[in-house]
Image (spheres, rainbow, N blue to C red):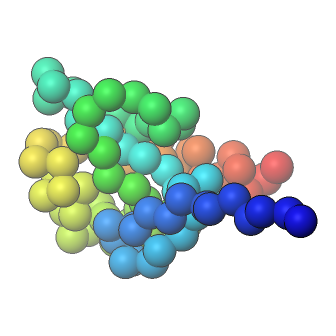
Amino acid sequence: MSTNKKVPLRKCVATGEMLPKKEMIRVVRSKEGEVSVDSTGKKAGRGAYLSKKEEAVEVARKKNILSRQLEADIPEEVYEELLVLIRRESIL
């Protein structure tokens, strides 16, 4: 008899979709207030999840969603890094 392992779900802050954690990208704010992309999903700090779609990143940028969720200013480089990660994964 096999037991099904529970898949952790997370909610995308931009689209509201519930997706498996592995299909999301985490953006984290450290205690010092530094915002970065967490590719491992294990960095310490307050995190917000985005689905791996360019549309989700653009919605988050346009509506300033990440800034509200993380209660910090989001540098433009973070959005660019998110887009690069998504494009790189779509190629592979």
Residue situated in front as seen by the camera: 77 or 28:
28
Front-lying residue, 82 or 27: 27
Residue 72, horizontal then vertical, whole percent: 12, 43
Image label count: 0
Q: Position of residue 67 (x, y in %)?
A: 17, 53
Residue at 26 percent across and 68 percent down: it is 62
The residue furthest bottom is 16
Q: In percent of the image, x 36 and y 44: which residue is there? A: 27
Query: In the displayed image of the protein, which residue is found farthest to the top?
Result: 32
Q: Taking the image as drawn, is residue 31 in sight?
A: yes
In the picture, the quarter occupied by the N terminus is: bottom right
Query: Splitting the image into 4 quarters, where does residue 3 fall?
Result: bottom right
Residue 75 seen in the figure: no
Please state which of residues 8 and 12 is positioned toward the viewer in this rendering: 8
Question: Is 11 on the left or on the right of 25, as rendered?
Answer: left
Q: Is residue 67 left or right of residue 42?
A: left
Q: Quick check: 10 left or right of 48?
A: right
Between residue 28 and residue 81, name the one nearer to us.
Answer: 28
Residue at point 30%, 45% (across, down): 47
- In x, y percent, where is residue 59? 34, 71
Q: Quadrant of residue 80?
A: top left
- Residue depicted at 47% across the width and 74% down the height: 18
Residue 38: image location, x then y, percent: 45, 36
Q: Is residue 33 above or below residue 71?
A: above
Q: Going by the picture, which residue comes out furthest to the front?
A: 1
